[in-house]
Image: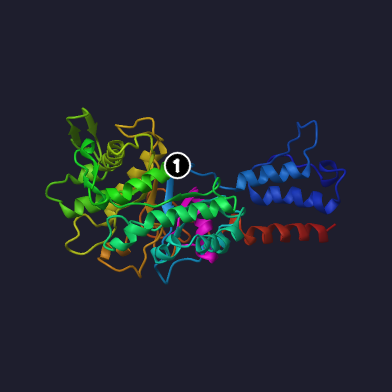
Amino acid sequence: MPYLPNEEALYPKLPLLAAIFVKYILLAGNTFYVINKNMTSYLSLSLCLILLFNVLVVDAFTGTYGINYGRLADNIPAPESVVTLLRANKIKNVRIYDADHSVLTAFKDSDIQIIIGLGKEFLKDISVNEDRAIEWVKINVQPYLPGTLIRGIAVGNEILGGEDTELWEVLVPAVKNVYNALDKLDLSHKIEVSSPHSEAVFENTYPPSAGVFKESILPYMLPLLNFSKQIGSPFYINAYPFLAYKSDPSHIDLNYALFEKSSGIYDAKTKLHYDNMFEAMIDAAYFALEKTGFEKMPVICSETGWASQGDENEAGANVKNARTYNNNLHKLLLKKKGTPHRPKMVMRAYVFALFNENQKSGPTSERNFGLFKADGSVAYKIGFRGLVPSSASKDFVLRGGFWSSQWFVALVSAVVLTQFLDL
């Protein structure tokens, strides 16, 4: 057992109770001890606590792996428990589809970077009223800074190419007003403004070098890309090999869609070979951007995933395929590599989704994209831990966040108080 000096020897200049606290927090937290018998000098209390929290705080998959935290459900864990879940699984990047205040409050001091959403219901109003944009930012962003790491605002989701063409016309003015609001509040250098797209913005994506935007989209896409370039925002695309496979299972190799061993595809124009559909989708977006003059704009996948359950006509929607896709995607992103066409541009993606959402409309698959079930247990095993054990994995973290919440503080306090009363 590592050597722990007595309290007086440990911190001769500190009150005895403080010395006891440091000693026993080290014992309660981990088998890591910052003090040993070979030390020639004493560490300060502040340094001890810094080292302690570096042990307890979960490191993150910085810059490559994130997750979409959708909440169209009435049975998922509270935001505070979600923070515990994310931190325990080293997930540092999160997207939500609104600016829910309970979520933003829960994420305070979590060290998790979050992109919030401005819903399509606000676009028309904000597009013609910059004061309304300023008001929205003052209510939904400013009060939570800097504790909550709000790093971006997604203005709408899959607007261009969607059914409501009126929203196409107001998207760019809304994006500009949101950015201008941030700028006037001295936040534009801290918070990115963007608008994620679906595959519906493309006329063609196969082979990747044929990637091109729809002519009907260009009058709205080009101004958005121009403004995004001015403010340094990337191009966000929701890329789902699952949806591509589901729409044409007789002509798409399932293994190719799942990152499994396959013959892949060969792009004769570029002489590039693609082992999986995900990278082909990302490169198709790069080629479309190049053809419109935005060859330097980075591409980030804002949504991707695979359904673990679906209707009879939803080919490939099952637990086995969902586990395979998400496990292989996770491994790929951790390699921090680029695509065949852009090998130096590290791929980054937000997986859809954190939970199965029982109130989503549409086919059964829409309610079964979660890596976790509604009770916080893992939907299938890909190396993550749930809030509670499940048949897929018995590795779990305590609901409520034992090592990152008041339970840990309570335990340490009890130990310290007991020791103090025995003095």
Q: Nearer the viewer, residue 214 or 268?
A: 214
Residue drawn at 25 percent across, 57 percent down: 318
Q: Residue furthest left?
A: 250
Location of the C terminus by quadrant is: bottom right
Magenta span: 81-103
The reply to whether residue 397 is in sight is no
Q: Nearer the viewer, residue 140 or 215?
A: 215
Compared with 260, 161 (above or below) is below
Q: Nearer the viewer, residue 173 or 142?
A: 173
Residue type, label 1? Gln
Residue drawn at 45 percent across, 41 percent down: 230
Q: Residue furthest front?
A: 128
Where is residue 374? Give x, y as percent: 41, 65
Q: How is the image coloured?
A: rainbow
Secondary element at tag 1: helix
| Residue on which disc 1 sits | 230
Left or right: 24 in relation to 225: right
Residue drawn at 62 percent across, 44 percent down: 55
Q: Nearer the viewer, residue 97 or 84?
A: 97
Where is residue 178? Give x, y as percent: 48, 55
Q: Indicate yes or no whether the magenta region holds residue 362.
A: no
Left or right: 107 in relation to 50: left
Location of the N terminus by quadrant is: top right
Where is residue 399? Give x, y as percent: 52, 62
The reply to whether residue 303 is in sight is yes
Residue drawn at 62 percent across, 54 percent down: 147
